Image (cartoon, helix red, strand yellow):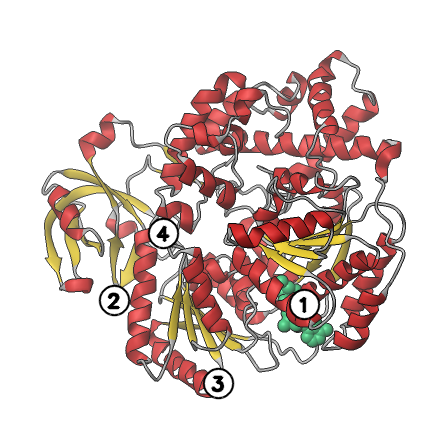
Amino acid sequence: MSNTRPNSLTTSITYLKGVGPKRAELLQVELGVFTFFDLIQHLPFRYEDRSKFYKISEITADTTSIQLVGKIRSKKMLGAGRHSRLVAIFDDGKKKMELVWFKGGKWIQSSLPLDINVVIYGRPQNFKGKWNIAHPEVERADQFESRGGGGLHPVYSSTEKLTSRGLHSSGLGRLIRVALSEVRREIEETMGEEILKELKMPGRLEAFDLVHSPKTLQEADSALKRLRFEELLYLQLTLLKQKHSVTVNMEGVRFEEVGDKFNEFYNEKLPFELTGAQKRVMKEIRADLNTGAHMNRLLQGDVGSGKTIVALMTALLAIDNGFQACIMAPTELLANQHFKGVTELLGEMDVRVELLTGSVSKSARKPILEGLESGDVDVIIGTHALIEPAVKFANLGLAVIDEQHKFGVAQRSKLWAKATISPHVLVMTATPIPRTLAMTAYGDLDCSVLDEMPPGRKDIKTVHRTDSGRLGVNDFIEKQISDGRQVYVVYPLIEESATLDHKDLMDGYDSLTRRFPLPEFKIGVVHGRMKAEDKEFEMQRFAKGETSILIATTVIEVGVNVPNATLMIIESAERFGLSQMHQLRGRVGRGGEQSYCVLMTKDEFSKEARRRLETMCRTNDGFEIAEVDMDIRGPGDVTGTQQSGIPDLQMADIMRDRDLMITARYIAGNILEEDPQLELAKHQILKINLDRILEGRPNWSRIS
Ligand code: ADP
Ligand code: MG
C-alpha cells in the first residue's frame, strides 16, 4: 500500500528516534525499509509466549526456547583466555541446570543476582546428555512483574549486519513501536466495514497495534491476516481491473534483430551446448521481445540450472537492437561474480560491460556514469547502486533482476523510471513458484522454467551425521582436499544472538585449524561482521583456489559459483529451513566432479527438523523440496518461518498465504461484478485507494 499513505508515513526513517544515518542505510539495504510506514510493515514472523513458565524437566528436543523461573545458586568463571566462560547454576526448585556465557562473562557475573527469583529465557541445548542454556536472558522476577514482562513477544527477522548494529529482533521491535506511535494518527482504514465484518477482521490501526504488541496469539493471528489480506485484496482488484481495461498490453521496445553480437557469441564464444530447457527459454524470450509488447517474464530455475547465460544472451539481443541492458543482483558479491562471469564469457568481444556497486570509487564511477548516459556502456552489472539518481541511461531496453526477492517494489520502479518506454524485464529466481500461483499473483506475467540441469551434473550425495561421526567427516574433508577439491563449512545465523553465532563459527574455525593446520591447509573465514571488502577478499581467495576450506555464516547463500568446491558441510543443520539448506547445497555440484553435502546435527532434534533432514537426504529436486517445505509450514501458519521471498508484497507472501489470496481473489471478483466501476457508497474506500495505486507507481500487476 506504499502509495496510499499520507505524508508523514513516508517520512524517511533517518528521522526516527534511535535511527541515525548508519542504521538508516542498513535498514534500507538489508530490509528495504525506507520510511516509517515501511518499518511498521515489517511484521513479526513469529511470537514467543512469555506468559508461561516451564520446568527444567519439561525440556525436550522439540523445545526451541523456554522461560523458567528460579534462583541462581552459584556463578564462576571457568577456563582461561579465549576459552574462558561464565557458568552459573540455576535451580528451579526441583532440578538444576547450567547457564553459560562465552562472551562478556566478567561483566555479566557481577550483575547476576544470587538466591533471589529470576526469570530466565533462552534456547536449551543438550551437552553430553545434560541441558544447558547459553547466553540466556536473565531478569529479576520482581522487575519482570512490574514491567508486565509476561506476555507475547513479537519476533522480527533481522540480518547479521543489522544484528551487529543492535538491531536484532527486540531492537527492531522497539524501533517499530516508536514509529507506530509517531504515525498512528495517519493510518486510515482501507477496507470497507462490510468486508471487515464479513471476514471478522480488525480495523487497520488496530491490526498494526495488535501485530506489534499482541496480547494473545489469536489476536496477533487475526491482525496479521487482516494486513496480509488487505494487500492481497488490492493486488487482486488491480489485476482484475486491468484485465478489463484496454491497456493490458503495455508498449514495449521491439527487438527485431538477432544480430552480430548474439550470433558471434552463440557461434564462437558459447563454451557449451545449451540445454534443451535453455534453448526453449531463449525461444520464449525472443518471441516476447519481437512482439512490440512489454516483456515481463519470470525465469525460474533451480540453483545451477544456468540462468546466467540466458540473461547474458538476452542482453546481447538488446545490444544488437541498439539498446543497453542492466543486470541487477542483490549483493555485491553476486554482482561481482556476474561481472566476472559475463566478461569471461564474452572474452574479446566488442561489448562494453561495466560494474557498478557501492564499493566502486568516485573516480572510477565517473566514466561509467558518463558511458551509461552516452550509450557507450552496453551492459551494466550492479547492485542497488544502479537505482541511484545519478545513474542515467541513454536507452535502457532490458533489465534483468537476479534473485529478485531482495528488492522492494519501490526500488524496482526507480529503475524503470530511467527509460522512456519501460524496459523489458526478466526476473530470475531459484524459488520455485507453481505456475498457477504465479499467474494468480501476477496476472499476465509469463513464466519460463529451466527444468533441466546442464549435462554431466551428478546429483549431490547428501548424508546426515551427528557429532559422533565428526571424525569420519574430517577424514572425508581431508580426502576431498587431497584430491584438489574445496570445501564449504557453513554455520547458521541465530537471529537473537550474534555473540553465539560468532562463537560457533570461531570454535569451528579453531577445531578445524587444529585438525588441518597451516601451512599445509589453507582456511578462510567469511561472516557478516566483516567489512564488505574483507569478505570479498576471502571469497576471492576461495574462488581462486588459494584456500581449500571456507568457513562461513549464511552470507554465501545466494548464487556464489566456485565449481571446484565439492563438499558442503552444514553445521547445526537442524536449525536451517529446507529452502535455505537447498540453496546452500546448490553451492556445490557446479563442476563435473561428484559433490557431497553433509548435514551435521546434535544427537537430539525436533520431529520437524528430522523431516527436513530426511527430505534433503532423499532428493535434490527444488520443487519437491518446496512442496515439503510448504507442507511442514502450512499455509497461513503465522508462527511459521520467514517469508519465502516472493516479490512485490510487503506483508503477504503468495506461497504462505495462498489460501488468503484465493479468498481475496474471490471477494475482489464479487465486488467488481456487483459494481465494476466501484461507484457504490460502500466501495468508496476501495475506489480511492485503488485509484491511487493505479495512477501511481509501483504497480502491482507488473513485476516491473
Ligand atoms: P544459476 O541458475 O544457479 O544462476 P549459473 O548460471 O550460475 O546457474 O550456472 C551454473 C554453472 O553451470 C555455471 O558454471 C555455468 O557456466 C554452467 N552452465 C550453464 N549452462 C550450461 C550448459 N548448458 N552446459 C554446461 N554448463 C552450463
Ligand atoms: Mg545465479
* Contact check, label 1 and label 4, Cβ < 8 Å: no
State which mark lies toward you, 2 or 1.
Answer: 1
Dot 4 or dot 3, earlier in sequence: 4
Picture coordinates of residue 453 (x, y %)? 69, 71
Q: Who is closer to the viewer here, 680 or 314?
A: 314
Q: Quadrant of ligand 1?
A: bottom right
Residue at 58% of width from left, 37% of height from top? 650
Q: Amino acid at mark 3?
A: Gly
Pointer 4 local density, CA inside 10 Å: few below 14, some 14–19, many at least 20:
few
- Mark 4–mark 3 Cα distance, whole angstroms, equals 41 Å
- Mark 2–mark 3 Cα distance, whole angstroms, equals 36 Å
Q: Which residue is mark 1?
A: 305
Pointer 2 local density, CA inside 10 Å: few below 14, some 14–19, many at least 20:
few
Residue at 77% of width from left, 24% of height from top? 671
Q: Which quadrant of the structure image shows residue 416?
A: top right
Q: Which mark is residue 63?
A: 4
Picture coordinates of residue 288 (x, y %)? 85, 53
Residue at 31% of width from left, 64% of height from top? 506
* Mark 3 close to ligand 1, CB under 8 Å: no
* Mark 1 close to ligand 1, CB under 8 Å: yes
Residue at disc 2, secondary structure: loop
* Contact check, label 4 and label 3, Cβ < 8 Å: no
In this view of the protein, can residue 257 be seen by the observer?
yes
- Mark 1–mark 4 Cα distance, whole angstroms, equals 38 Å
Q: Amino acid at mark 1?
A: Ser
Dot 1 or dot 3, earlier in sequence: 1
Q: Which residue is mark 2?
A: 128
* Mark 2 close to ligand 1, CB under 8 Å: no
Q: Which residue is mark 3?
A: 484
Instruction: State the quadrant of the C terminus.
Output: top right
